[in-house]
Amino acid sequence: MSDGIRIAARRFGVDRPQDWQVDAVRAAVGGRDVLVVAPTGGGKSLVYQLAGIERDGWTLVVSPLLALQADQVEHLEAAGLTAARLSSAEGKRRRREVLDAVADGSLDVLLVAPEQLAGALGDELAQHPPGLVCVDEAHCVSEWGHDFRPDYLRLGALVRRLGGDAPVIAMTATAAPPVRASVVERLGLDDPLVVSTDLQRPNLRYAVEQVPDRDRQLAAVLARVDAEPAGSAVLVYARTRRSTEEVAAALRDAGRDAEHFHAGLGTRARADVQRRFMAGELDVLVATSAFGMGVDKADVRLVVHVEAPPSLDDYVQETGRGGRDGDEAGVLLVHRPEDLSLGRFFAAGVPRRGSVEKVLAALRDGADPADPAAVAEATGLGRQAAQRVLNLVDLLDPEEERTVAAVREKAEARQRLERSRVDLVREYADTQRCRSAYLLGYLGEQVDRCGTCDNCEAGVAAEEHADDSLGAASLEHPTFGHGTVVETEDDRVTVLFEEAGYKTLARDVVEDRDMVAEA
């Protein structure tokens, strides 16, 4: 380890960076692109922070959430760096101050949301190209990513538009092998160093409780939260705003200090609830997925999902909020089969034929696909409807003709993918395998039994045999088409198909029928 990296790490309270962090930093400092896959709270941010100090010039960080950006700015400034964010929340004067700081070299780190780069800001930053670019939550770039975000789609082109020769560090906590490959392709990473750390969290104790109805569901949540000592930080995830309010009220009636959090609350109310929870003034927070990404509270002792999450990726992300201090934390999914229909309901629909026709006509007439507002005005559609069709057009293969049928077929494939994610949540809830091994297998890691989940403790989880002979293999299925193996077990494999989403196949059928494609 170079003395420079070690000294820089001390500015962030780290005496000795881990070997994978040093490898990633050295690669980026040397000008090589890097993809970092590490668990929530695993130290991904330290990579760009150290590389930015070691490289000449300023660092651009693309991050999806304003709250996360604000936390990062505070953390960077505490380490003695100059940092700022530019978002819709900053006024013209503040924007000018930040851009002047970029121009005169007095700013070390600038954080922006991806959509900010698409406008005039990107043009101004291109006049003073960064020395390093970091893309946080990089799985959002991939159409296979669980948290696919349209604003990330054009990020590769937007970064290249900045000019210069800055290496790119892409970071994510959850990315199965197909997602990693998609991130590399969409961001245009050039021969990146891929750093994938051990995603296993041995201090998390996974469990599932099956319930038949809503009353039992609420009772199970109340009983599990009640088992935690008073003052323990508890995070409860629910799928809908109404559910967060209902569960929080039930917890208060049971004597717990609980509040709800969702996107429907006012900005001040959300900020106040989050502040109280982070400061330890509030024991239990019941939230939708609007609370989570970028939240860094070390002492959460219990994470409960009162309803099934939309995907295993979301589940890994959200349960990763527990036990970030390294101490033991409980993780519980209260599973009611009926809740899976909610996930299927939330799966994206298919746009109307007329809407697609209008957008394609506007594009043929010269409308800028990077300007949804202009396309919406030209078509008479709402901005959200126009943006959705533009996103689907952008997902088409470059050689593929832009037709109404092609766009709607892409939407149908997207819908199948999202619904297949819901089916995997059901498999996880019903499995008798080690739950930790099941989740990590889905993310491409073959591990031994954890010994602490409910299935391991009940003695129903069999030994895990790490046979990765089909790991990341390409398959050609006579019905589902082309796919990539994301998980292998003794008797079956889980495959992500480009058109059909996730499917579980009998392993002997895959091998006997010679479905493995030539490399």
Image: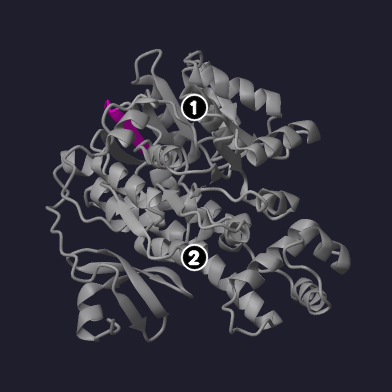
List the residue tagged with mark 1. Answer: 75
* Place of residue 174 in the rendered image (x, y in percent of width and height, measured from the top left): 39, 50
Q: Picture quarter containing residue 387?
A: bottom right
| Residue at (39, 13) in percent of width and height | 230
In the image, residue 413 above or below residue 60: below
* Place of residue 489 in the rendered image (x, y in percent of width and height, measured from the top left): 21, 63
**Circle 2 — which element?**
loop
**Frontmost residue, 444 versus 26:** 26
| Residue at (41, 55) in percent of width and height | 31
Residue type at numbered disc 1: His
Check residue 328 for magenta coloring: yes
Mark 2 closeness class: few <14, some 14–19, many ≥20 residues within 10 Å = some
In the image, residue 19 above or below residue 219: below
List the residue tagged with mark 2. Answer: 188
Q: Picture quarter containing residue 68?
A: top right
Residue 262 visible to the viewer: no
Residue type at numbered disc 2: Gly
Mark 1 closeness class: few <14, some 14–19, many ≥20 residues within 10 Å = some
- Left or right: 414, with 53 as reference point: right
* Place of residue 404 in the rendered image (x, y in percent of width and height, measured from the top left): 70, 80
Cα distance in 3D space between marks 1 and 2: 29 Å
Q: Which secondary structure type mostly characterizes the magenta part of the structure?
A: strand
Where does the magenta region start and end?
326-336
Q: Picture quarter containing residue 485?
A: bottom left
Q: Quadrant of the C terminus?
A: bottom left
Residue 399 visible to the viewer: yes
| Residue at (58, 84) in percent of width and height | 399
Check residue 480 for magenta coloring: no
**Circle 1 — which element?**
helix
